Amino acid sequence: MRIVYVVGTRPNFVKTAPVIAALRARLPEGRHALVHTGQHYDRLMSEVFLEELGVPAPDHLLEVGSGSHAQQTARVMERLEPVLTEERPDLVLVPGDVNSTLAAAVTAAKLQIPVGHIEAGLRSFDRTMPEELNRILTDQLSSHLFIHSPEAGENLRREGIAEEKVHFVGNTMIDMLVALEPRFRAAGAAERLGVQPGEFLLVTLHRPALVDGPLLPETIGRLAALGREMRVVFPVHPRTRKMMEAVESEHPGLLLSEPLGYLDFLSLLADSGAVLTDSGGIQEETTYLGIPCFTLRDNTERPVTVEAGTNTLLGLDPAAISTIPSSLKSSRKRPAQPPPFWDGKASQRIADVVAGAGQSG
Ligand code: UD1
């Protein structure tokens, strides 16, 4: 069996690394070719992750870089098509909801190569988010839809996707977290940054709706005010850094850093008192770890994290940041109770499905 895996961004690497490892072990005679589109390209956004996750060097680098949505998507399609023609895979596996995901799914489907979508079926029901369009279209083009929560299955059913294509396998991002747990527990990132475990707020923000407009300066102001009550640690995504250049961001109590490697980031996450984010993956990682998460968005495509009790939707409203200390005081700390199949074995379940399909096909 010949499989091509297409990744492009930081969270893609995390979601795909354990799937590559599981399929390589299950199908050692097969061809496993990794394509890196180059959507993320800075060392701190790309190589560091691949090294820490134990991902083999990519077989194909498309080097598409940044651009408008159409440019980025089109460049991946143009450069991936000859790679797929050369590799002749039986399956193309794509993770998540970024532009590289959609571009790879379209390219493969038009060459009549079956597509497997890792993390299928998530919906925010907000079509102003580019990721929502990427999710809907990728799911429509996929032959194998690997879902991590029952509501993802309901969303797909509503969109008319045949039941036999949908496989409830669990969360491959949590597979990676489970595999790295001994290492990130020993990494001591909080200590190195000079913050007390359990006492600080970890912040990540990068969504265009928040950082590309007037909400960003207000958010920084609110974080600076909160920094007088608890330390705030904020590793800054390059998109956000670019937009922050015009914003006053030096404040006591607000500790800004470059993007972190995955082990250091998970170490900080596990040691944080709470997290403020607009990321999807971090809503899931905090659910697994039992860390209170405040999501600065109007909606989430991951309602399972709200049901689990760890995630609170604050709305797309920087003023809500000031409610975090009182929410933390009034909420009872509860032990982490990960959703079903968020157990470190999702990639094995994907390997079962793919290896089974290979035999029957
Ligand atoms: C992308 C995904 C988003 C995902 C996020 C994870 C889309 C539409 N968006 O958003 O869903 O949550 O990745 O991080 O696919 N840049 C650098 N260096 C890099 C990468 C980006 O400086 O290595 C800067 C560039 O100025 C670029 C901007 O960040 O224009 C945005 O990068 P892009 O890949 O377009 O989107 P993200 O915001 O990273």
Image (cartoon, grey):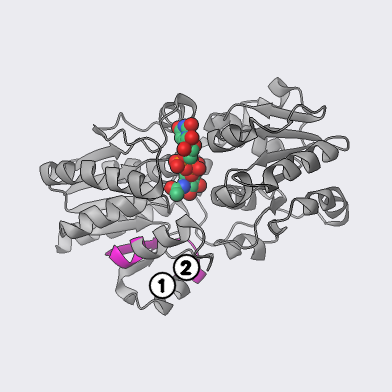
Circle on res. 332: none
Q: CA distance from mark 2 to mark 1?
A: 6 Å
Q: Residues within 10 Å of mark 2 (few under 14, many from 20)?
A: many
Which is nearer the eye, 118 or 104? 104
Q: Position of residue 334 (x, y in %)?
A: 76, 55
Q: Residue at x 60, y 56 (%)?
A: 338
The residue labelled by disc 1 is: 156
Q: Residue at x 30, y 73 (%)?
A: 164
Q: Residues within 10 Å of mark 1 (few under 14, many from 20)?
A: many
For label 2, being within 8 Å of ligand 1 is answered: no
Label 2 element class? helix
Would residue 32 appear left or right of 124 to someone viewing this image? left
Which span of residues is magenta-colored?
138-152
The amino acid pointed to by label 1 is Leu
Residue 26 visible: no
Q: Position of residue 187 (x, y in %)?
A: 61, 26
The residue labelled by disc 2 is: 152
